Image (cartoon, helix red, strand yellow):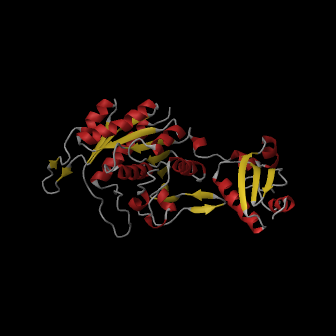
Amino acid sequence: MITEEKVREVLAEINDPHLHTSLTELGAVKEIKIKEKLLSLKLAIAQPGTAEQMQLQQEVVTALKEAGADSVGLRFEQLPDSVVSEYGTPEAEEEKTLLDRADQTTFISITSGKGGVGKSTVSVNLAISLAREGKKVGIIDADIYGFSVPDMMGIEERPRVENEKIYPVERFGVQVISMGFFVEDNSPIIWRGPMLGKMLNNFFNEVVWDDLDYLILDLPPGTGDVALDIHSMLPQTKEIIVTTPHATAAFVAARAGAMAMKTEHEILGIIENMAYFESQVTGEKEYVFGKGGGQKLAEELRSDVLAQIPLGQPEEREDIFAPSVYDNDHPIGRIYSDIAKDVITRTAKE
């Protein structure tokens, strides 16, 4: 059976992940109880409730089991501020997350009432078009269950991880983070709401973003847990709602708009995607999915239709693989360019 003396000896070799100082030197060991085969510990650390706590927990449990413990129970609490300030470094205190820089960055959520309306295509092309206008842009693929941004942009590499921080992948001048980077072989995600919220929190707080002018959030369709988490994390986010011309799609999209209005988020406008099909031979427009849905939604939400985007497909290029990215000189690419310029005007800070 492991002894209390042995427990303290093991913990003396393990550091707090933020203060980089031994747990025993910090006075972090608040309670040790040994009852039959169960070892119970209470530890105080600099930043409980973070991803580093999970790593520390695994390190402590592994070390104590190797030292002879059969079963280890852990509880964590916050170290006193006096201890954190004594052992912390000024650099760590000055480090700011993306959420701390909300006054510098405009957050734009791209949302829809239902899936299949091209929301992610809009997110990707708006982000790239803003970058083409000289803006510093990031995109978070927050559609946790239906992540598609890396595939749409033709991204094959993974984010770099250094010193427990994640560095986003950059393509077409846009910094990108997606759940798809952390899932092997396109495996399904079966997490529940609280776990998803924690992953989103990590996307904001554990990712090293450059100073950004715009952060685009590709949200899941509807008004579920992830959308609610985003609304609570980002009280100043603005929203663009994507719909198709069909009346039913617009009716469902109105729910997402209503949620934005109730949480006092500004709706920048409506994008009506798949608005029509234009024949390359005759130039005639065919309204495959009906007409009027975008305008009706805009009237209901007291907003504007930013654009009507036709059915189309980017031209395939041998030199660049990006299945959903439109070139600047493509007719639809020019529409996205106009949307980006409109967004810049509407979000200009006084």
Q: Is residue 193 toward the left or the right of residue 308 in the image? A: right
Q: Quadrant of residue 315?
A: bottom left
Numbered label tally: 0
Q: Is residue 232 above or below residue 42?
A: above
Report the residue at 65% width, 58% height from top: 164
Query: Which x, y percent locates residue 340?
Result: 39, 45
Q: Position of residue 257 (x, y in %)?
A: 37, 35
Residue 64 locus on image (x, y percent)? 76, 63
Residue 224 visible in this rendered orientation of the protein? yes
Picture residue at 61% right of the left edge, 41% below the top: 100
Q: Which residue lies at the image location 33% right of the left edge and 39% below the top edge?
A: 253
Q: Tell me which residue sits at (42%, 31%) in the image.
A: 261
Q: Quadrant of the N terminus?
A: bottom right
The one of 123 and 21 positioned closer to us in this rendering: 21
* Residue 28, visible in the rendered structure: no
Q: Residue furthest front?
A: 36
x and y percentages locating residue 204 in the rendered image: 56, 48
Direction right: furthest residue: 5
**Position of 248 relative to 33 (above/below):** above
Query: Which residue is farthest left?
Result: 282
Q: Is residue 234 above or below residue 262?
A: below
Left/right of residue 247 with respect to residue 133 in the rendered view? left
Asked whether 336 or 119 is in front, the reply is 119
